[in-house]
Image (spheres, helix red, strand yellow):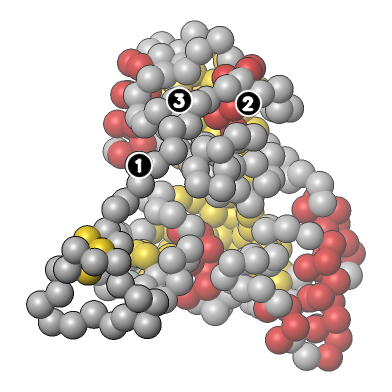
Amino acid sequence: MLVNDVVPQKRYSPRVGDRIEVMVPAPPKVTLEAEDIPLVIRHEDEHLAVIEKPYGLVVHPAPGHASGTLVNALLFHLDRLSSIGSDTRPGIVHRLDMDTSGLMLVAKSDEAHRQLAQALARREIRRGYVTAAWGHLDEERFTVDRPIGRDPHHRKRMAVRDDGRRAVTHFKRLERWNSADLLAIRLQTGRTHQVRVHLLSLGHPIVGDPLYAPGWERGFGGSGGRWAEELGRRAGRLFLHAAYLAFEHPITGEKLSYSCELPEPLLSAVEWARATS
C-alpha cells in the first residue's frame, strides 16, 4: 500500500486528501482435478445426475477449499459436466451448505443445465428438507416469508433484513419431542442459509448449528436442558438434510422424484428422541 506515493508507517492514520493506492493480487488459479471421493449416485443419464452429498463436503472449490470438494468427486465419477457457470462450478445447478447432507441435482449437458436453471427460477423443482429445531413451534404448519441478506456484523452469516432478497420457507411439524421439534420443510426460494436464518428469526434455531446457534442447548433448564444437551451430542452435526427432490427431466419430460433417508448419526438421534419424549 502507498499513501501519496510513499509506503506509510504502521502507526499512520488516513487524512482527508490522502491518495491511497492498494495492489490487489490476482486470485490464485484453481485447477480442477478428479478425486476418488466416495459418492452415492441415485440417477445418471447423458444429461444429468442426482447424487447424495455427504455431510462435511464442500460443493465447489473456494478459498480454503482448493480440492476435496463435490466437484472434484463429480469429475471422477461422471463422464462429463456442463460448462455453464464459473470455472470452479461445472454442473452445479444448486448448492447445499457444507454442513448439510442430502440430494442434489447435477447437470451433465449445457442444454440440461440451462433448462434446469430456468425451472429452478420458476420454482418448478421441489426441494424438501428434514430438520430438528430447538424448542416448540407455535403452529403445526406455517410459512415464513422474510427477506434475507448478508449480516452486516458477521461476514459468514446471513440475516433477516428489510433490504434483503425475498425468502419463503414452508414448515410442517412431524414430531414434538422433549425440547425440540422435528420438521419437514419445503423451499419456495433458495437463499443462502435460508432455513437456518428463518428458524433463528423465530427463536428456534436448528439443532447442532455451529454458526447460528452454538451451545444453544445449554439455555434450557432442568431435565429439558439435560435432554437437549444429549440430543445435541447424539446428533453431532447440523441437523439439516435434503430429503426430497422432484423435477421434470429437461430433455425427456419424464417426472422424476427421489427421497433420501436421514443418515447417521441423525437417524439414531431421532430414534433416541422418540424413545425419550
Q: Earlier in the sequence, mark 2 or mark 3?
A: 2
Where is the N terminus found, in terms of image quarters? bottom left
Where is the C terminus found, in terms of image quarters? bottom right
> Is 151 positioned to the left or the right of 114 in the image?
right
Q: Position of residue 223 (x, y in %)?
A: 86, 86
- Mark whose residue sits in front, 2 or 1: 1
The residue that label 1 is drawn on is: 26
Amino acid type assigned to the residue bearing label 1 in the image? Ala
Is the C-beta separation of discs 2 and 1 under 8 Å?
no
Quadrant housing residue 43: top right
Q: Position of residue 180 (x, y in %)?
A: 71, 72
Q: Residue furthest left?
A: 17
Q: Position of residue 247 (x, y in %)?
A: 45, 29
Q: What residue is at 41 percent from the left and 19 percent from the top? A: 82
> Is 271 positioned to the left or the right of 65 in the image?
right
- Mark whose residue sits in front, 1 or 3: 1
Instruction: Tell me if residue 9 comes above or below residue 157 in the rendering.
Output: below
Quadrant housing residue 272: bottom right
Does dot 2 land on a helix, a strand or a loop?
A: helix
Q: What residue is at 64 percent from the left and 41 percent from the top? A: 57
Amino acid type assigned to the residue bearing label 3 in the image? Gly
Q: For the residues marked 1 and 3, what is the alpha-carbon distance in whole angstroms?
A: 25 Å
Q: For the residues marked 2 and 3, what is the alpha-carbon distance in whole angstroms?
A: 12 Å
Does dot 3 land on a helix, a strand or a loop?
A: loop
The residue that label 3 is drawn on is: 91
Residue nearest the viewer, comparing 249 with 239: 239
Q: How many marks?
A: 3
Amino acid type assigned to the residue bearing label 2 in the image? Ala
The residue that label 2 is drawn on is: 73
